[in-house]
Image (cartoon, grey):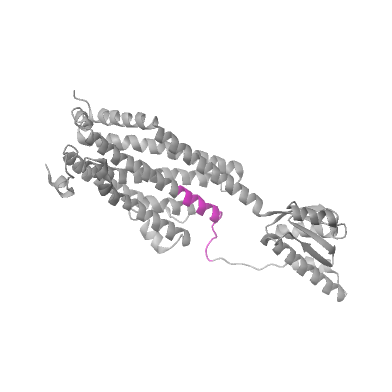
Amino acid sequence: MNISATRAVRLVARRELATRLRSKAFVISTLIMLVFIGGYIVLMNVIGSSSNHSTVGFTPATGSLAVSVKSTGKAVGEDITTRTVSEAAGRKQVSDGKLDALVVGGPGDFTVVVKKSLKSGLANTFNVLARQEALNTQIRSLGKDPADVNRAVASASVHVQPLQPAGEYQTQRLVLGIVAVVLLYMSLMINGQAVAQGVVEEKSSRVVELLLATVRPWQLMAGKVLGIAVVGLVQMIVFAAVGLGLGLATGVLSIPAALLTGTAVWTIVWYLIGFFMYAVMLAAAGALVSRQEDANSVVTPVLMLIIVPAVIGWSVIPANPDSQLGHVLSMIPLFSPMLMPMRIALGVAPAWEIALSVVLSVALVVGLVALAGRVYRNAVLRTGARVKLSDALRSA
């Protein structure tokens, strides 16, 4: 039966897609990752909401300090809730963990009671307040009005002239970039290895001989890679939608939606480029062996081309996003899928660098498809001992 090349590739891809989307491994791995993403966002929300919030008790004698403590805390980034209690009740609540601190004494000479230690945000708040109270005392001793002096001090500011614009949401963008690359890395590793394992499985079970009676080798390879790429793409879209949705809903991410969407889209684009780049090499590598036991020996060198750029990217980019090394490495096709999404998320990748890296990477993919197709064609029907790469490249 003769069928067109497009239909042959589509049939093979549809077979891979239907088989893998229904598999327990796909469902379980997707659910595990969704639980991980949801748990991480919830944890970040809890940490973010609790780390900068404190409850402070005041006795009737120190109640006049409550307003000053709240305003001072706001100035240093600490959200403080105040409560008026008796000293005895307040000390018990501090001991029980219901109050982070209790202010006793008087406005001019107060003491802060804590269970074990004063958290850093509250320590900064009370240190600033103590200095202000000491300054007010000195001002009064000179016969001046502390309110007038405080207003003059509050209106004073330093003029800052930055040489480069400061990046907004830098910490959140860094976290977003790291998460995007981690998801991309895991998807490439899992789905890339699935390509090689599928090739070896079909070859060892002789199913490939039946398939090649209907389609050509390059069509079988292309269909397999395309089908598994779509499976990974479905996962990436689900992960991005759930992660961004939860991040925005919980307030963990305050980055504008346009920046979040742009990062998600570019992550998916680089997933597709990276997947085709590595998957065709893994398909060719899988065709060189006939047993699953031998697969690691041919798959590991290709996986190292994913692992090494990822490790370098996680080390170089977060430490210095705009470094010259990051600029250069992100332009090299084998490094681009791991480094460029992070630089895009951080907003340090110029448009021309993104465009050039895409062009270079796509060009490499085209070359790898031709080379891997030759290896696959010449090795996939050869059973028994491992086929040498040089022999697969030379065979007619």
The residue at the point 66 percent across, 68 percent down is: 158
Is residue 100 something that shows in the picture?
A: yes
Q: Is 83 within the magenta? A: no
Pick the front one: 104 or 139: 104
Asked whether, in this view, residue 358 is left or right of residue 132, the answer is left
Q: Is residue 305 above or below residue 16?
A: below
Asked whether, in this view, residue 154 is left or right of residue 290, the answer is right
Magenta stretch bounds = 163-180
Asked whether, in this view, residue 58 is left or right of residue 335, the answer is right
Asked whether, in this view, residue 91 is left or right of residue 373, the answer is right
Residue 161 drawn at (x, y percent): 58, 67
The residue at the point 65 percent across, 54 percent down is: 51
Pick the front one: 202 or 146: 202
Q: Residue furthest bottom?
A: 142
Q: Residue furthest left?
A: 396
Q: Is 170 within the magenta? A: yes
Residue 221 drawn at (x, y percent): 25, 37
Q: Is residue 340 above or below residue 27?
A: below
Q: Quadrant of the C terminus?
A: top left
Residue 321 drawn at (x, y percent): 46, 59
Q: Quadrant of the N terminus?
A: top left
Q: Is residue 362 above or below residue 135?
A: above
Q: Residue furthest top?
A: 1
Q: Residue 60 occupies which quadrant of the picture?
A: bottom right
Residue 341 drawn at (x, y percent): 43, 50
Q: Is residue 56 above or below residue 4?
A: below
The residue at the point 75 percent across, 68 percent down is: 153
Pick the front one: 187 or 147: 187
Q: How many marks?
A: 0
Pick the front one: 349 or 131: 131
Secondary structure predominantly adopted by residues drawn in magenta: helix
Is residue 333 something that shows in the picture?
A: no
